[in-house]
Amino acid sequence: MNHLLFRVVIANEQHLQFAESICAEMETSSKQRGTGISKRSPEQISYYILAGKAVIALTQSGEWAGFCYIESWDNDEYISNSGLIVAPSFRQSGLARKIKTKIFKLSRMKFPDAKIFGLTTSSAVMKINSLLGYVPVVYSELTTEEKFWDGCSSCVNYEILQSKGKRNCLCTAMLFDPMIHTNEIVLSQPITEQAS
């Protein structure tokens, strides 16, 4: 499927109807892959939508096809692009890259001085992050805010994280530091598109 058939927009209140199905797909996908993912609730997803901190991919017919949101930590010193999900029938279409690019640009617009980080077990996400300017880092370069690490408690690998004193786990940590890295190609494209 051609990813140009999708619109990736900043989510708003008209997309609240998809919160429950997005959460369900996040959980199902995590179980199928056997990898860790922090469990989310429809209320959490709705919060990020209403706060203007989420992007959603839509098909031509208005069906949700993918989603991602922004969380902030340590008084906005760090932010994470979290909850990336592409609905099963739209995977392998290039949509994940389009979503990650949009949420990266939204993150840079809302939090221009923040370090953007992510944890992932997905080689595809690592490749996309690398294209956006992220680099692999050790966990000590990430937020120390306990609330972030508490979010890992529903992950199948949480015992490993705890046994390592939250210094490492099976996920790869990646970081974009705006004081060190730039990504002029991504940032030169407009971010202001809203859903109609």
Image (spheres, rainbow, N blue to C red):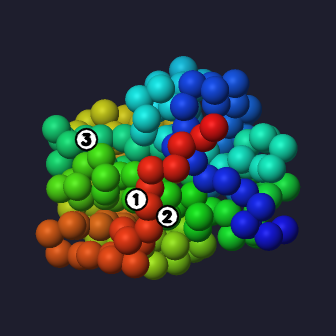
Q: Amino acid at mark 3?
A: Trp
Which residue is painted at 61% across and 53% down in the image? 8
Mark identifier at residue 105: 1
- Label 2, label 3: how many angstroms apart (C-alpha)? 21 Å
Measured along the vertical axis of the image, is residue 181 above or below residue 115?
Answer: below
Quadrant of the snapshot with the C terminus = top right
The reply to whether dot 2 and dot 1 touch (C-beta < 8 Å) is yes
- Label 3, label 1: how many angstroms apart (C-alpha)? 18 Å
Which residue is painted at 66% across and 42% down in the image? 26
Left/right placement of residue 143 relative to residue 163 reads left
Residue 113 location, x and y as percent? 18, 56
Residue 7 location, x and y as percent? 67, 53
**Which residue was labeled with disc 3?**
73
State the SS at label 3: strand
Measured along the vertical axis of the image, is residue 185 above or below residue 190?
Answer: below
Mark identifier at residue 101: 2
Left/right placement of residue 100 relative to residue 19 reads left
Quadrant of the snapshot with the N terminus = bottom right
- Label 2, label 1: how many angstroms apart (C-alpha)? 6 Å
Of residues 12 and 104, the one drawn nearer to the viewer in this rendering: 12
**Outermost residue, top direction?**
43
Of callouts 3 and 1, which one flags the residue occurring earlier in the amino acid sequence? 3
Residue 82 location, x and y as percent? 47, 48
State the SS at label 2: helix
